[in-house]
Image (tube, rainbow, N blue to C red):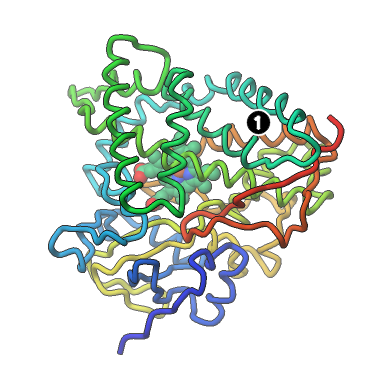
Protein backbone atom coordinates (compact mmCIF):
# COMPACT_ATOMS: atom_id res chain seq x y z
CA UNK A 1 0.00 0.00 0.00
CA UNK A 2 1.34 3.45 -0.85
CA UNK A 3 1.22 6.18 1.77
CA UNK A 4 -0.26 9.42 0.39
CA UNK A 5 2.38 12.13 0.04
CA UNK A 6 2.62 14.68 2.80
CA UNK A 7 1.49 18.10 1.64
CA UNK A 8 4.04 20.55 2.93
CA UNK A 9 1.93 23.65 3.62
CA UNK A 10 4.58 26.16 2.59
CA UNK A 11 7.39 25.05 0.25
CA UNK A 12 10.00 26.29 2.71
CA UNK A 13 8.70 24.31 5.67
CA UNK A 14 11.41 21.66 5.88
CA UNK A 15 13.86 24.10 7.46
CA UNK A 16 16.45 23.31 10.09
CA UNK A 17 14.07 24.62 12.75
CA UNK A 18 10.72 23.15 11.63
CA UNK A 19 11.79 19.79 10.27
CA UNK A 20 11.67 18.05 13.65
CA UNK A 21 7.85 18.36 13.62
CA UNK A 22 7.60 16.45 10.34
CA UNK A 23 10.28 13.96 11.37
CA UNK A 24 8.58 13.24 14.69
CA UNK A 25 5.23 12.68 12.99
CA UNK A 26 6.40 10.78 9.89
CA UNK A 27 9.74 9.18 10.72
CA UNK A 28 13.02 10.08 8.99
CA UNK A 29 11.88 9.16 5.44
CA UNK A 30 8.50 10.22 4.08
CA UNK A 31 6.67 11.07 0.88
CA UNK A 32 6.08 14.71 -0.02
CA UNK A 33 4.51 16.66 -2.82
CA UNK A 34 6.71 19.42 -4.22
CA UNK A 35 5.61 22.49 -6.17
CA UNK A 36 4.58 21.47 -9.66
CA UNK A 37 2.79 18.44 -8.15
CA UNK A 38 5.99 16.43 -8.23
CA UNK A 39 5.95 13.53 -5.76
CA UNK A 40 9.24 12.84 -4.04
CA UNK A 41 10.70 11.29 -0.90
CA UNK A 42 12.18 13.45 1.83
CA UNK A 43 15.17 11.93 3.63
CA UNK A 44 15.71 13.89 6.84
CA UNK A 45 17.72 12.31 9.68
CA UNK A 46 21.51 12.58 9.96
CA UNK A 47 21.97 8.84 9.41
CA UNK A 48 19.69 8.53 6.37
CA UNK A 49 21.04 11.73 4.74
CA UNK A 50 24.59 10.58 5.38
CA UNK A 51 23.86 7.16 3.95
CA UNK A 52 22.36 8.48 0.67
CA UNK A 53 25.06 11.14 0.15
CA UNK A 54 27.97 8.82 0.97
CA UNK A 55 26.70 6.05 -1.26
CA UNK A 56 28.32 5.84 -4.62
CA UNK A 57 26.49 7.82 -7.26
CA UNK A 58 25.91 4.73 -9.33
CA UNK A 59 23.24 3.35 -7.01
CA UNK A 60 21.75 6.82 -6.41
CA UNK A 61 21.89 8.52 -9.77
CA UNK A 62 21.82 12.33 -10.15
CA UNK A 63 20.78 12.12 -13.78
CA UNK A 64 17.10 13.04 -14.21
CA UNK A 65 16.77 10.62 -17.11
CA UNK A 66 16.67 7.95 -14.40
CA UNK A 67 13.45 9.39 -12.98
CA UNK A 68 10.81 6.88 -14.04
CA UNK A 69 8.19 9.52 -14.83
CA UNK A 70 10.53 11.05 -17.42
CA UNK A 71 10.39 8.00 -19.66
CA UNK A 72 9.99 10.16 -22.76
CA UNK A 73 13.15 12.10 -21.85
CA UNK A 74 11.43 15.46 -21.31
CA UNK A 75 11.28 17.43 -18.12
CA UNK A 76 7.84 18.90 -17.31
CA UNK A 77 7.75 22.73 -17.54
CA UNK A 78 6.68 23.15 -13.93
CA UNK A 79 9.35 20.81 -12.51
CA UNK A 80 11.04 22.63 -9.63
CA UNK A 81 14.37 24.22 -10.57
CA UNK A 82 14.06 22.88 -14.09
CA UNK A 83 17.01 24.98 -15.25
CA UNK A 84 19.29 23.36 -12.72
CA UNK A 85 18.56 19.76 -13.61
CA UNK A 86 18.33 20.36 -17.35
CA UNK A 87 21.95 21.46 -17.67
CA UNK A 88 24.97 19.39 -18.63
CA UNK A 89 27.02 19.86 -15.50
CA UNK A 90 28.54 18.15 -12.46
CA UNK A 91 25.32 18.08 -10.49
CA UNK A 92 23.57 15.80 -13.01
CA UNK A 93 26.50 13.51 -13.85
CA UNK A 94 27.22 10.11 -12.34
CA UNK A 95 30.16 7.74 -11.92
CA UNK A 96 33.01 7.92 -14.45
CA UNK A 97 31.49 10.93 -16.29
CA UNK A 98 31.33 12.86 -13.05
CA UNK A 99 34.83 11.82 -11.91
CA UNK A 100 36.32 12.89 -15.25
CA UNK A 101 34.74 16.36 -15.14
CA UNK A 102 35.47 16.88 -11.48
CA UNK A 103 39.10 15.79 -11.95
CA UNK A 104 39.62 18.35 -14.70
CA UNK A 105 37.88 21.11 -12.71
CA UNK A 106 40.02 20.29 -9.66
CA UNK A 107 43.13 21.01 -11.72
CA UNK A 108 41.93 24.59 -12.11
CA UNK A 109 39.91 25.20 -8.92
CA UNK A 110 42.85 24.51 -6.60
CA UNK A 111 43.31 25.39 -2.89
CA UNK A 112 46.05 27.81 -4.02
CA UNK A 113 43.62 29.66 -6.31
CA UNK A 114 41.12 30.06 -3.44
CA UNK A 115 43.83 31.20 -1.02
CA UNK A 116 45.07 33.65 -3.64
CA UNK A 117 41.69 35.42 -3.48
CA UNK A 118 41.98 36.23 0.23
CA UNK A 119 43.39 39.74 -0.13
CA UNK A 120 40.84 40.69 -2.84
CA UNK A 121 37.93 39.32 -0.77
CA UNK A 122 39.10 41.46 2.14
CA UNK A 123 39.32 44.52 -0.13
CA UNK A 124 35.88 43.95 -1.65
CA UNK A 125 34.43 43.42 1.85
CA UNK A 126 36.01 46.63 3.12
CA UNK A 127 34.70 48.60 0.13
CA UNK A 128 31.14 47.44 0.86
CA UNK A 129 31.54 48.21 4.57
CA UNK A 130 32.89 51.70 3.77
CA UNK A 131 29.72 52.41 1.80
CA UNK A 132 27.34 50.92 4.38
CA UNK A 133 27.66 53.78 6.84
CA UNK A 134 26.40 56.21 4.15
CA UNK A 135 23.12 54.31 3.81
CA UNK A 136 21.58 55.81 6.96
CA UNK A 137 20.52 54.58 10.38
CA UNK A 138 18.75 51.39 9.26
CA UNK A 139 20.40 49.39 6.50
CA UNK A 140 19.24 46.33 4.57
CA UNK A 141 22.30 44.10 4.84
CA UNK A 142 21.07 41.70 2.15
CA UNK A 143 20.94 44.46 -0.44
CA UNK A 144 24.11 46.25 0.61
CA UNK A 145 26.37 43.50 1.91
CA UNK A 146 25.44 39.81 1.84
CA UNK A 147 24.10 39.85 -1.73
CA UNK A 148 26.79 41.86 -3.60
CA UNK A 149 29.82 40.25 -1.95
CA UNK A 150 29.43 36.62 -3.17
CA UNK A 151 28.68 37.56 -6.77
CA UNK A 152 31.61 39.99 -6.82
CA UNK A 153 33.87 37.23 -5.49
CA UNK A 154 32.69 34.76 -8.14
CA UNK A 155 33.27 37.35 -10.90
CA UNK A 156 36.77 37.92 -9.49
CA UNK A 157 37.36 34.15 -9.47
CA UNK A 158 36.27 33.91 -13.13
CA UNK A 159 38.21 37.03 -14.19
CA UNK A 160 35.04 38.81 -15.41
CA UNK A 161 35.82 42.48 -16.21
CA UNK A 162 34.31 45.10 -13.89
CA UNK A 163 31.99 46.48 -16.57
CA UNK A 164 30.21 43.11 -17.03
CA UNK A 165 29.70 42.33 -13.36
CA UNK A 166 26.44 44.15 -12.92
CA UNK A 167 24.89 42.24 -15.82
CA UNK A 168 26.06 38.92 -14.33
CA UNK A 169 24.50 39.94 -11.05
CA UNK A 170 21.17 40.76 -12.71
CA UNK A 171 21.09 37.45 -14.63
CA UNK A 172 22.00 35.45 -11.56
CA UNK A 173 19.30 37.31 -9.60
CA UNK A 174 16.63 36.30 -12.13
CA UNK A 175 17.78 32.68 -12.26
CA UNK A 176 17.70 32.42 -8.49
CA UNK A 177 14.51 34.41 -8.03
CA UNK A 178 11.59 32.39 -6.81
CA UNK A 179 9.10 34.41 -8.81
CA UNK A 180 10.58 34.35 -12.35
CA UNK A 181 8.30 32.60 -14.86
CA UNK A 182 9.69 29.59 -16.79
CA UNK A 183 9.92 31.85 -19.88
CA UNK A 184 11.90 34.53 -18.04
CA UNK A 185 14.19 31.94 -16.50
CA UNK A 186 14.68 30.26 -19.91
CA UNK A 187 15.57 33.52 -21.69
CA UNK A 188 17.91 34.62 -18.89
CA UNK A 189 19.59 31.21 -18.75
CA UNK A 190 20.19 31.34 -22.50
CA UNK A 191 21.60 34.89 -22.25
CA UNK A 192 23.98 33.86 -19.46
CA UNK A 193 25.15 30.73 -21.30
CA UNK A 194 25.73 32.84 -24.44
CA UNK A 195 27.73 35.40 -22.47
CA UNK A 196 29.86 32.68 -20.83
CA UNK A 197 30.65 31.11 -24.22
CA UNK A 198 31.83 34.49 -25.59
CA UNK A 199 33.70 35.24 -22.38
CA UNK A 200 35.63 31.93 -22.49
CA UNK A 201 36.49 32.65 -26.09
CA UNK A 202 37.80 36.11 -25.21
CA UNK A 203 39.94 34.60 -22.41
CA UNK A 204 41.79 32.46 -24.93
CA UNK A 205 43.26 35.62 -26.44
CA UNK A 206 43.61 37.40 -23.11
CA UNK A 207 44.56 34.84 -20.44
CA UNK A 208 44.82 35.83 -16.78
CA UNK A 209 45.40 34.37 -13.34
CA UNK A 210 41.80 33.20 -13.03
CA UNK A 211 39.63 30.08 -12.96
CA UNK A 212 38.52 30.50 -16.57
CA UNK A 213 42.10 30.49 -17.86
CA UNK A 214 42.77 27.54 -15.54
CA UNK A 215 39.87 25.59 -17.07
CA UNK A 216 41.06 26.38 -20.61
CA UNK A 217 44.51 25.02 -19.73
CA UNK A 218 43.38 22.06 -17.59
CA UNK A 219 44.60 18.82 -19.05
CA UNK A 220 44.89 15.27 -17.72
CA UNK A 221 48.09 13.25 -18.17
CA UNK A 222 46.44 11.39 -21.06
CA UNK A 223 45.75 14.71 -22.83
CA UNK A 224 42.02 14.81 -21.98
CA UNK A 225 40.65 18.39 -21.81
CA UNK A 226 37.35 20.16 -21.23
CA UNK A 227 35.24 20.93 -24.27
CA UNK A 228 33.94 24.49 -24.79
CA UNK A 229 30.45 23.46 -23.78
CA UNK A 230 31.71 21.70 -20.63
CA UNK A 231 33.55 24.88 -19.60
CA UNK A 232 30.44 26.99 -20.12
CA UNK A 233 28.39 24.65 -17.90
CA UNK A 234 31.08 24.60 -15.19
CA UNK A 235 31.11 28.40 -14.92
CA UNK A 236 27.30 28.44 -15.05
CA UNK A 237 27.05 25.94 -12.18
CA UNK A 238 29.69 27.65 -10.04
CA UNK A 239 27.75 30.91 -10.33
CA UNK A 240 24.38 29.31 -9.58
CA UNK A 241 25.66 27.01 -6.80
CA UNK A 242 27.94 29.58 -5.20
CA UNK A 243 25.84 32.73 -5.21
CA UNK A 244 22.61 32.41 -3.23
CA UNK A 245 24.05 29.72 -0.92
CA UNK A 246 26.71 32.14 0.30
CA UNK A 247 24.33 35.15 0.46
CA UNK A 248 22.09 33.17 2.81
CA UNK A 249 24.95 31.68 4.82
CA UNK A 250 26.12 35.20 5.66
CA UNK A 251 22.64 36.52 6.43
CA UNK A 252 21.57 33.51 8.54
CA UNK A 253 24.75 33.74 10.59
CA UNK A 254 24.34 37.48 11.17
CA UNK A 255 20.80 36.82 12.46
CA UNK A 256 22.03 34.06 14.79
CA UNK A 257 24.80 36.25 16.22
CA UNK A 258 22.56 39.30 16.68
CA UNK A 259 20.04 37.12 18.49
CA UNK A 260 22.66 35.82 20.93
CA UNK A 261 25.18 38.47 22.03
CA UNK A 262 27.00 35.93 24.23
CA UNK A 263 27.85 33.90 21.14
CA UNK A 264 28.91 37.07 19.35
CA UNK A 265 31.19 38.06 22.24
CA UNK A 266 32.66 34.57 22.31
CA UNK A 267 33.34 34.69 18.57
CA UNK A 268 35.05 38.04 18.96
CA UNK A 269 37.14 37.38 22.04
CA UNK A 270 38.26 33.93 20.90
CA UNK A 271 38.56 34.99 17.25
CA UNK A 272 36.43 31.89 16.57
CA UNK A 273 34.96 32.92 13.19
CA UNK A 274 35.80 29.56 11.65
CA UNK A 275 33.68 27.85 14.33
CA UNK A 276 30.90 30.38 13.78
CA UNK A 277 30.73 29.41 10.12
CA UNK A 278 30.73 25.64 10.87
CA UNK A 279 28.04 26.00 13.54
CA UNK A 280 25.91 28.00 11.13
CA UNK A 281 26.30 25.38 8.41
CA UNK A 282 25.26 22.73 10.92
CA UNK A 283 22.37 24.41 12.69
CA UNK A 284 20.82 26.75 10.08
CA UNK A 285 22.28 25.77 6.74
CA UNK A 286 21.45 27.98 3.80
CA UNK A 287 21.01 24.85 1.68
CA UNK A 288 17.87 23.35 3.10
CA UNK A 289 17.43 20.46 0.68
CA UNK A 290 19.61 18.97 -2.03
CA UNK A 291 18.07 18.04 -5.37
CA UNK A 292 17.64 15.01 -6.28
CA UNK A 293 18.88 11.42 -6.24
CA UNK A 294 17.12 8.72 -8.30
CA UNK A 295 17.71 5.19 -6.95
CA UNK A 296 18.48 2.72 -9.71
CA UNK A 297 17.02 -0.13 -7.69
CA UNK A 298 14.51 -0.30 -4.81
CA UNK A 299 16.30 0.90 -1.68
CA UNK A 300 15.52 0.36 1.96
CA UNK A 301 16.14 3.43 4.12
CA UNK A 302 15.16 3.09 7.77
CA UNK A 303 11.70 1.50 7.79
CA UNK A 304 10.85 2.55 4.24
CA UNK A 305 11.46 1.08 0.79
CA UNK A 306 11.84 3.71 -1.94
CA UNK A 307 11.01 2.29 -5.37
CA UNK A 308 13.63 2.60 -8.12
CA UNK A 309 13.42 5.84 -10.09
CA UNK A 310 11.46 7.92 -7.57
CA UNK A 311 13.13 11.27 -6.75
CA UNK A 312 14.73 11.65 -3.34
CA UNK A 313 15.12 15.08 -1.81
CA UNK A 314 17.84 15.24 0.82
CA UNK A 315 17.21 17.49 3.82
CA UNK A 316 20.80 18.48 4.59
CA UNK A 317 19.73 21.36 6.85
CA UNK A 318 17.38 19.06 8.77
CA UNK A 319 20.18 16.53 9.29
CA UNK A 320 22.10 19.16 11.27
CA UNK A 321 19.35 19.55 13.86
CA UNK A 322 18.71 15.84 14.37
CA UNK A 323 18.71 15.24 18.15
CA UNK A 324 19.71 11.60 17.62
CA UNK A 325 23.06 12.90 16.36
CA UNK A 326 23.55 16.32 17.99
CA UNK A 327 21.60 15.96 21.26
CA UNK A 328 18.39 17.46 22.58
CA UNK A 329 19.64 21.04 22.10
CA UNK A 330 20.61 20.33 18.46
CA UNK A 331 18.76 23.40 17.18
CA UNK A 332 20.72 25.74 19.45
CA UNK A 333 23.46 27.80 17.80
CA UNK A 334 26.45 27.19 20.06
CA UNK A 335 29.99 27.68 18.82
CA UNK A 336 31.39 26.06 21.96
CA UNK A 337 29.88 22.67 21.17
CA UNK A 338 33.04 21.50 19.40
CA UNK A 339 33.77 20.50 15.86
CA UNK A 340 31.07 17.96 15.10
CA UNK A 341 30.87 16.64 11.56
CA UNK A 342 27.97 18.20 9.68
CA UNK A 343 26.63 17.57 6.20
CA UNK A 344 26.11 21.23 5.29
CA UNK A 345 28.36 20.96 2.25
CA UNK A 346 27.13 17.47 1.41
CA UNK A 347 29.36 14.39 1.41
CA UNK A 348 30.68 11.85 -1.06
CA UNK A 349 31.33 12.33 -4.78
CA UNK A 350 29.31 15.57 -5.09
CA UNK A 351 30.78 17.23 -1.96
CA UNK A 352 30.62 21.01 -2.46
CA UNK A 353 33.32 22.14 -4.85
CA UNK A 354 33.24 25.66 -3.41
CA UNK A 355 33.43 24.77 0.31
CA UNK A 356 36.94 26.25 0.85
CA UNK A 357 35.90 29.48 -0.90
CA UNK A 358 32.60 29.75 1.02
CA UNK A 359 34.44 29.18 4.33
CA UNK A 360 37.13 31.77 3.57
CA UNK A 361 34.66 34.35 2.34
CA UNK A 362 32.28 33.90 5.28
CA UNK A 363 35.09 34.18 7.82
CA UNK A 364 36.35 37.42 6.28
CA UNK A 365 32.89 38.93 5.81
CA UNK A 366 31.60 38.16 9.32
CA UNK A 367 34.74 39.11 11.24
CA UNK A 368 35.04 42.36 9.25
CA UNK A 369 31.36 43.30 9.63
CA UNK A 370 31.23 42.78 13.40
CA UNK A 371 34.73 44.23 13.78
CA UNK A 372 33.69 47.45 12.02
CA UNK A 373 30.24 47.75 13.68
CA UNK A 374 30.55 46.15 17.14
CA UNK A 375 27.06 47.24 18.22
CA UNK A 376 25.25 46.12 15.08
CA UNK A 377 21.78 44.77 15.91
CA UNK A 378 18.59 43.69 14.15
CA UNK A 379 16.22 46.58 13.43
CA UNK A 380 13.17 44.29 13.58
CA UNK A 381 12.08 41.48 15.82
CA UNK A 382 13.68 38.19 14.73
CA UNK A 383 10.19 36.71 14.23
CA UNK A 384 9.32 39.44 11.70
CA UNK A 385 12.06 38.51 9.25
CA UNK A 386 10.61 37.24 5.97
CA UNK A 387 12.35 34.27 4.32
CA UNK A 388 12.61 33.42 0.61
CA UNK A 389 9.72 31.18 -0.54
CA UNK A 390 11.98 28.30 -1.55
CA UNK A 391 12.22 24.66 -0.55
CA UNK A 392 15.88 24.52 -1.62
CA UNK A 393 17.57 27.38 0.18
CA UNK A 394 16.79 29.24 3.36
CA UNK A 395 17.62 32.88 3.96
CA UNK A 396 15.97 36.25 4.56
CA UNK A 397 14.60 38.40 1.74
CA UNK A 398 15.75 41.52 3.61
CA UNK A 399 17.86 42.01 6.70
CA UNK A 400 17.27 45.44 8.28
CA UNK A 401 19.86 46.26 10.93
CA UNK A 402 20.93 49.26 12.96
CA UNK A 403 24.67 49.57 12.40
CA UNK A 404 25.55 51.58 15.50
CA UNK A 405 28.84 53.47 15.72
CA UNK A 406 31.75 52.30 13.58
C1 LIG B 1 27.68 21.11 -4.38
C2 LIG B 1 26.36 23.42 -0.30
C3 LIG B 1 28.85 27.36 -1.69
C4 LIG B 1 29.91 25.17 -5.87
C5 LIG B 1 27.14 21.39 -3.14
C6 LIG B 1 26.41 20.45 -2.32
C7 LIG B 1 26.03 21.11 -1.18
C8 LIG B 1 26.53 22.46 -1.27
C9 LIG B 1 25.19 20.56 -0.02
C10 LIG B 1 26.14 18.98 -2.65
C11 LIG B 1 25.01 18.82 -3.62
C12 LIG B 1 24.63 17.37 -3.82
O1 LIG B 1 25.20 16.47 -3.20
O2 LIG B 1 23.70 17.15 -4.62
C13 LIG B 1 26.90 24.69 -0.35
C14 LIG B 1 26.77 25.67 0.70
C15 LIG B 1 27.47 26.78 0.30
C16 LIG B 1 28.04 26.49 -0.99
C17 LIG B 1 25.99 25.49 2.00
C18 LIG B 1 27.70 28.11 0.97
C19 LIG B 1 27.37 28.41 2.10
C20 LIG B 1 29.42 27.08 -2.91
C21 LIG B 1 30.33 27.95 -3.62
C22 LIG B 1 30.61 27.34 -4.81
C23 LIG B 1 29.89 26.08 -4.83
C24 LIG B 1 30.83 29.30 -3.09
C25 LIG B 1 31.51 27.78 -5.91
C26 LIG B 1 32.28 28.82 -5.90
C27 LIG B 1 29.36 23.91 -5.83
C28 LIG B 1 29.41 22.99 -6.95
C29 LIG B 1 28.77 21.81 -6.53
C30 LIG B 1 28.33 22.05 -5.15
C31 LIG B 1 30.05 23.24 -8.31
C32 LIG B 1 28.56 20.53 -7.34
C33 LIG B 1 29.68 19.56 -7.08
C34 LIG B 1 29.48 18.22 -7.78
O3 LIG B 1 28.36 17.87 -8.15
O4 LIG B 1 30.50 17.53 -7.96
N1 LIG B 1 27.22 22.60 -2.45
N2 LIG B 1 27.66 25.22 -1.36
N3 LIG B 1 29.19 25.95 -3.67
N4 LIG B 1 28.71 23.33 -4.76
FE1 LIG B 1 28.29 24.23 -3.02
Q: Whole-percent x and y of residue 168? A: 43, 31
Q: Is residue 251 left or right of residue 199?
A: right
Image height of 162 relative to 37, above or below: above
Looking at the rendering, which quadrant does residue 196 occupy? top left
> In the depicted view, which residue is nearer to us: 348 or 157?
157
Left or right: residue 298 versus residue 26 is left
Residue 43 sits in quarter = bottom left
Q: Is residue 269 visible?
A: no
Residue toward you, 148 or 154: 148
Residue to which mark 1 is pinned: 364
Look at 66% across and 22% down and name the residue there.
127
Q: Quadrant location of the C terminus?
A: top right
Rendering coords of residue 6 (x, y %): 44, 79
The total of numbered circles placed on residues is 1
Q: Residues within 10 Å of mark 1 (few under 14, many from 20)?
A: some
Outermost residue on the bottom side: it is: 1
Residue 383 visible, this angle: yes
Name the residue located 26 percent from the left edge and 19 percent from the top edge: 201
Can you tell me which quadrant of the image ligand 1 is in? top left
Mark 1 C-beta to ligand 1 under 8 Å: no
- Identified at 13% across, 62% down, the residue is 72
Amino acid sequence: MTTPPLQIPVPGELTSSTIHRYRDENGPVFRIELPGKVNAWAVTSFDTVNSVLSNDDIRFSKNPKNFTALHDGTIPPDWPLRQLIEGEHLLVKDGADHRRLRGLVNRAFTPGRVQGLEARIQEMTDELLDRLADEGEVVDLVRHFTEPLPVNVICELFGVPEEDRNQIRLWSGVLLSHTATPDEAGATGAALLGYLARFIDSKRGDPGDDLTTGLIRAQEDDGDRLSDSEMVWILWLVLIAGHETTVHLLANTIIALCADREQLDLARTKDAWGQVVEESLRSRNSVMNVLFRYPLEDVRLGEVTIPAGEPIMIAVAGSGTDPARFGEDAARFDIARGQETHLGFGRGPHFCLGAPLARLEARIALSSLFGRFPELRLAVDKGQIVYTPSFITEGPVELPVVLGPA
